[in-house]
RNA sequence: GCGGACGUGGCGGAACUGGGAUACGCGCAUGAUUCAGGAUCAUGUGGUCGAAAGACCUUGUGGGUUCAAUUCCCACCGUCCGCACCA
């Protein structure tokens, strides 16, 4: 008998599957459809990560099983290829991003194919292909038309190293997500997408989908909806009104100051002569501070008095107006009412600057600290005695009646900065005309192709490298025919990934983003798996874009993804992140070469709970290789036997059941453990295991370890592919145990075990239990208080 | 500070709905095979006491509910992830 040698068989089967087009999805098939999606990879220069292999292998197992169950499966693959890493790589090496992308894709493709993943390669897409990004641009034009894409002059997060504007989502801990340089501010005219218009629907429609709870929670948190009241504070000696948002309008009688963000438009006007110098210095300094530094300041609060006052709308008291950089300019209008007695932050601020601390909600002690809970109102005029809940309603109504305020909903979510000052992205299809303003490129002129140039270094001025290409920039205005200039900003790398899963449905279509009938057939995606790190980025953005496309009747449903699961990352053996600089990267090529793709796939499923981060362990890989070797011997050995005993048949059906249940729950690790147990049992009684069993075993194994299963299937004399076999259903008769081990407990401690019929009656069980020697020993001379019988499980004697 | 997850052998981890704690794998030990190493196979492997039979202890800590708790409740300690001066 030949020993298991994966290198000899894997390539052969990969070629056969490809040649026969075994995994092609069929549009409009009569079979029930399932659209199963993994996040398409970014083809970086580092090659495939074992982390890619982890989630892809797991989903491939699900896909292969579902095909055998009779589903028409769409399991596609493509490349999310625009973006900074490639551009940076190009700048460093002098290799054009397009060429680098092509080379990287070739490597990724070879690596993915060497894993035997059952993608439908005929639907491969690439976001940098003009035929693809034509439609990315088309979506932008539609957004523009509906007023959801607009330009504005805003201070944006600016990475001084990448020389690029960043979305809030790309700033991690005050630093650039890509290069970890502390982020500063720069005011630029930027394209924005109005995701805030969809904030409510993005929250509400989470009810309709099946996402992990933590994903829903994170998205809601990110959108940050809060209910409150906006109150108008009129400035003394002026007609200016400062609008203040608060969730605690019940504390308005405790206001002893008002604080504006340094960027607030009224700051200059409100600053009196004698405070001018002080204030200017303060603003200058706080502007110099990056967000990163602001956060690092240990929450020490600083501020300066403007010299002006305003009126509290509820009691007409004069309230001093301050400026402080703890107030966020972009949230709630950039103005905060300070209630030291009932807010921790305000308390600190008041202590530092000697502001009055006035209790207006009873229950705390203003000498000790802020009391932030709800209570009953005091020192609040006609509202005294009301509970906070009631007061919030009453005061809001009172303000509203006098046109001094109104109820308001605030979100943390902000509009999405959609401009990037880079070369390697989709050009924004807009032409600027001095007469007509921003004019959309006519749809018939799409795509606006990215010009192929030699130099793509950032200009550093805030303009993209495209600004230097005059013959591309200078065009006629499509509206008036006059002089126009192309928009030189490009889109962020999220643009292409917003809608890519729609393109898989109809990847060659040149007339529309995708045929509407095909969209209707395949969408929504039934199961989408990806990384947790995309929860507030890609996942939220793409839901927004899809909802927009639904509104303009392109997308067929309200939500794009029916189910969302997440995998944990794969760490290096030392528990750190895999990184070239640590020299701890595991290259999947080496694992495939030394142990085979099946071992890699099974190991990555076995290594730990799917949703949990886990460290690589090469010893563990060896263990899985051993298991597959044992399985190989087991199958070939036992295939010569004619008959199988009942025990192994039962074990097989139990295994079958376990796989069915576990896969839906993404419990891949225990599924593999069940296979190992089965093979251990099989080898123990190998003379009593026959061909019928090993054939069925191979069918069960095939989604997980496709190459070895296909090869053994052939060696057993089958002529058709194992993947044309039907997935089996466990036989309930064989699942039913006839004999069970009944546990006998004395006072909850296991003292004996007895083999009994599964449906033994209570009387018989008791009788049997008490007749046991061990039980007699433990109960001798003791008073028996109680006997508990759990059918099919145990008997507990309380003494 | 807020939101979420979690704490089980030397290690990764398992345990359905409250019913045998430590499945499966790694590692380790002993033996077989081998000139040797590797590979493979067999057996053993939570702790303490014991020659053994066996007894007792053990799921972060302390308490509670229960015939029975890794699982449920309360308090505390600790770890990880996300957000974070959001008014």
Image (spheres, coloured by chain):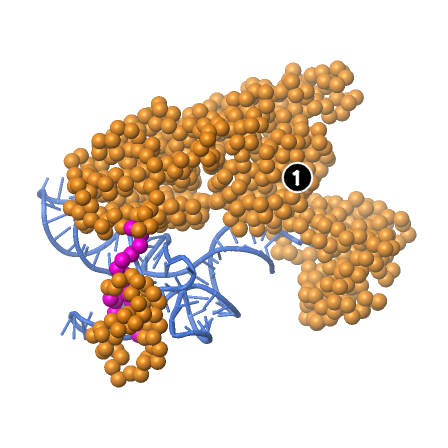
**Residue at image point 81% right, 50% down:** A242
What kind of secondary structure does the magenta stretch mostly adopt?
A: strand
State which quarter of the image contains the C terminus of chain A.
bottom left
Classify residue A66 as left or right of residue A283.
left
Classify residue A734 as left or right of residue B78.
left
- Of A753 and B45, which appears nearest the observer? A753
Residue A255 at least partly seen: no
In the depicted structure, whether residue B54 falls above or below residue A709: below
Q: Position of residue A621 (x, y in %)?
A: 30, 43
Label 1 element class: helix
- Of A314 and A2, which appears nearest the observer? A2
Boundaries of the magenta span: A734-754
Image mark count: 1
**Residue at image point 34% right, 36% down:** A726
**In which quadrant of the rendered view does residue A84 lie?**
top right
Q: Colour of chain B?
A: blue
State which quarter of the image contains the N terminus of chain A.
top left
Q: Give the residue number, with chain letter if any, for mark 1.
A: A195
Q: Colour of chain A?
A: orange
């Amino acid at each position: 008998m030949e020993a298991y040698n994966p290198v000899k068989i894997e390539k052969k089967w990969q070629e056969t599957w490809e040649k026969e087009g075994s995994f092609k999805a069929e549009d409009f098939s009569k079979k029930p459809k399932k659209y199963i999606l993994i996040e398409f990879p970014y083809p970086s220069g580092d090659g495939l990560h074992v982390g890619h292999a982890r989630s892809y292998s797991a989903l491939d197992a699900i896909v292969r099983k579902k095909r055998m169950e009779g589903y028409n499966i769409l399991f596609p693959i493509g490349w999310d290829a625009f973006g900074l890493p490639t551009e940076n790589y190009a700048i460093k090496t002098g290799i054009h991003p397009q060429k680098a992308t092509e080379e990287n894709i070739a490597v990724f493709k070879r690596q993915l194919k060497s894993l035997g993943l059952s993608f439908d390669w005929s639907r491969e897409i690439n976001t940098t292909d003009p035929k693809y990004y034509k439609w990315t641009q088309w979506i932008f034009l539609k957004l523009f038309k509906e007023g959801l894409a607009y330009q504005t002059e805003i201070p944006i997060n600016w990475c001084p190293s990448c020389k690029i504007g960043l979305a809030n989502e790309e700033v991690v801990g005050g630093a650039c997500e890509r290069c970890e340089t502390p982020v500063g501010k720069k005011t630029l005219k930027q394209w924005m997408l109005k995701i805030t218009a969809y904030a409510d629907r993005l929250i509400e429609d989470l009810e309709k989908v099946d996402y992990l709870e933590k994903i829903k929670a994170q998205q809601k948190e990110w959108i940050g909806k809060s209910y409150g009241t906006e109150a108008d504070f009129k400035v003394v000696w002026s007609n200016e009104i400062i609008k203040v948002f608060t969730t605690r309008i019940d504390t308005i009688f405790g206001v002893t100051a008002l604080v504006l963000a340094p960027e607030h438009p009224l700051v200059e006007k409100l600053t009196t002569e004698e405070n001018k110098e002080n204030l200017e210095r303060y603003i200058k300094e706080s502007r110099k501070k990056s967000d990163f530094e602001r956060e690092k300041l240990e929450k020490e609060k600083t501020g300066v008095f403007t010299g002006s006052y305003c009126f509290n709308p509820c009691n007409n008291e004069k309230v001093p107006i301050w400026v402080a950089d703890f107030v966020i300019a972009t949230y709630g209008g950039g103005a905060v009412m300070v209630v030291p007695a009932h807010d921790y932050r305000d308390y600190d601020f008041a202590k530092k600057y000697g502001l009055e601390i006035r209790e207006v909600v009873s229950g705390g002690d203003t000498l000790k600290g802020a009391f932030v809970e709800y209570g009953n109102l005091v020192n609040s005029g006609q509202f005294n005695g009301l509970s906070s809940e009631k007061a919030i309603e009453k005061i809001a109504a009172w303000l509203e009646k006098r046109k001094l305020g109104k109820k308001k909903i605030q979100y943390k979510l902000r509009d999405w900065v959609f401009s990037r000052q880079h070369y390697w992205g989709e050009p924004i299809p807009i032409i600027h005309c001095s007469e007509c303003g921003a004019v959309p490129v006519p749809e018939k002129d799409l795509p606006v192709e990215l010009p192929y140039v030699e130099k793509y270094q950032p200009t550093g001025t805030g303009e993209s490298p495209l600004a230097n290409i005059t013959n591309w920039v200078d065009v006629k205005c499509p509206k008036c025919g006059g002089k126009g200039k192309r928009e030189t900003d490009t889109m962020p790398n999220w643009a292409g990934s917003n809608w890519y899963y729609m393109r898989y449905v109809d990847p060659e279509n040149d007339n529309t983003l995708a045929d509407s009938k095909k969209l209707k057939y395949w969408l929504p995606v039934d199961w989408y798996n990806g990384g947790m790190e995309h929860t507030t980025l890609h996942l939220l953005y793409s839901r927004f874009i899809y909802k927009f496309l639904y509104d303009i009747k392109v997308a067929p449903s309200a939500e794009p993804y029916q189910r969302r699961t997440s995998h944990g990352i794969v760490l290096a053996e030392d528990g750190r992140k895999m990184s070239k600089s640590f020299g701890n990267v595991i290259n999947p090529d080496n694992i495939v070469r030394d142990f085979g793709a099946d071992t890699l796939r099974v190991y990555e499923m076995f290594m730990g709970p799917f949703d949990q981060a886990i460290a690589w362990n090469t010893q563990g890989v060896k263990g899985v290789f051993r298991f597959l070797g044992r399985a190989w011997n087991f199958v070939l050995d036992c295939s010569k036997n004619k008959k199988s005993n009942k025990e192994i048949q039962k074990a097989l059906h139990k295994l079958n059941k376990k796989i069915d249940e576990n896969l839906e729950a993404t419990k891949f690790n225990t599924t593999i453990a069940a296979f190992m147990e089965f093979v251990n049992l099989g080898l123990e009684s190998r003379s009593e295991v026959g061909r019928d069993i090993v054939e069925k075993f191979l069918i069960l194994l095939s989604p997980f370890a496709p190459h070895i299963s296909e090869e053994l299937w052939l060696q057993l004399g089958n002529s058709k592919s194992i993947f044309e076999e039907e997935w089996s259903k466990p036989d309930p008769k064989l699942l039913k145990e006839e004999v069970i081990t009944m546990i006998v407990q004395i006072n909850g401690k296991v003292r004996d075990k007895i083999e009994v019929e599964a449906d033994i009656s209570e009387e018989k069980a008791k009788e049997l239990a008490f007749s046991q020697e061990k039980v007699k020993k433990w109960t001798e001379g003791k008073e028996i208080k109680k006997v508990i019988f759990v059918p099919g499980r145990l008997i507990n004697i309380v003494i």
